[in-house]
Amino acid sequence: MSNEARTFLNRWYEFVENHDPVRLDALVAEDAMISSPAFFTPKASKPYVIAILTAVLQGFEDFTYTKEWVDGQDIILEFTARIGDKKLKGIDRITVNEAGEIAHIEVLIRPLNGLIALAEHVRATLGQAAA
């Protein structure tokens, strides 16, 4: 495991536990990209990535990482969570840059009804933020 990956993981777990926006800002590279199961193409920009990750974590209940795989600067974190009455399982596939920041995060979630519930929550949360 690279030093960048280990440092990132320690800081990432602290963010997930505390939901601290300052910690998240320090974890995301300026040119970060996010690949979501709700969109065909990746979206790029630090503010967008931060907004999506914040909305997702606000919607999750009983969120727990269950497994971790690291290969150099590539990280896969398996998780379970609930959104409302929908249980879901997924992975965060994260690539960190040399500064230990998210360069790319790809999120995969199943089952479909859990993904739909999460997408609806994110859309509503982002809509409220824009209002």
Image (spheres, rainbow, N blue to C red):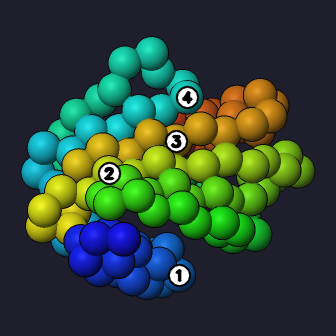
Residue at point 80% right, 34% down?
111
Amino acid type, callout 2: Thr
Q: Position of residue 60 (x, y in %)?
A: 66, 59
Q: Marks 2 and 4, how far apart in space?
A: 17 Å
Query: Which residue in the protein does label 2 denote?
Result: 95
Residue 18 visible in the current orientation = yes
Q: Are marks 3 and 2 in contact (CB under 8 Å)?
A: no
Look at the image and tell me in which quarter the N terminus lies. Answer: bottom left
Q: Are marks 1 and 3 in contact (CB under 8 Å)?
A: no
Mark 4 vs 3: CB contact within 8 A = yes
Q: Amino acid at mark 4?
A: Pro
Q: Amino acid at mark 3?
A: Val
Please tell me whether mark 3 or mark 2 is closer to you in this view: 2
Residue at 32% of width from left, 60% of height from top? 72
Q: Nearer the viewer, residue 93 or 30?
A: 93
Side of 92 relative to 9 (left or right): right
Question: Which sits earlier in the primary sequence, circle 2 or circle 4?
Answer: 4
Which residue in the structure is indicated by mark 4? 37
Find disc 1 in the rendering and name its residue.
17
In the image: residue 109, left or right of residue 68: right
Disc 3: which residue: 107
* Sooner in the amino-acid sequence: mark 1 or mark 2: 1
Q: Secondary structure at mark 4?
A: loop
Instruction: Report crowding for label 2: few under 14, some 14 to 19, many 20 or more residues within 10 A (C-alpha).
Output: many
Answer with the quarter of the image where residue 24 lies: bottom left
Q: Residues within 10 Å of mark 1 (few under 14, many from 20)?
A: few
In the figure, 10 relative to 57: above or below? below
Label 1: which secondary element: helix
Instruction: Give the CA separation, mark 1 to mark 3.
Output: 19 Å
Count neighbours of disc 3 (C-alpha within 10 A) and say few if under 14, some if 14 to 19, many if 20 or more.
Answer: some
Whole-percent x, y for residue 118 in the image: 65, 41
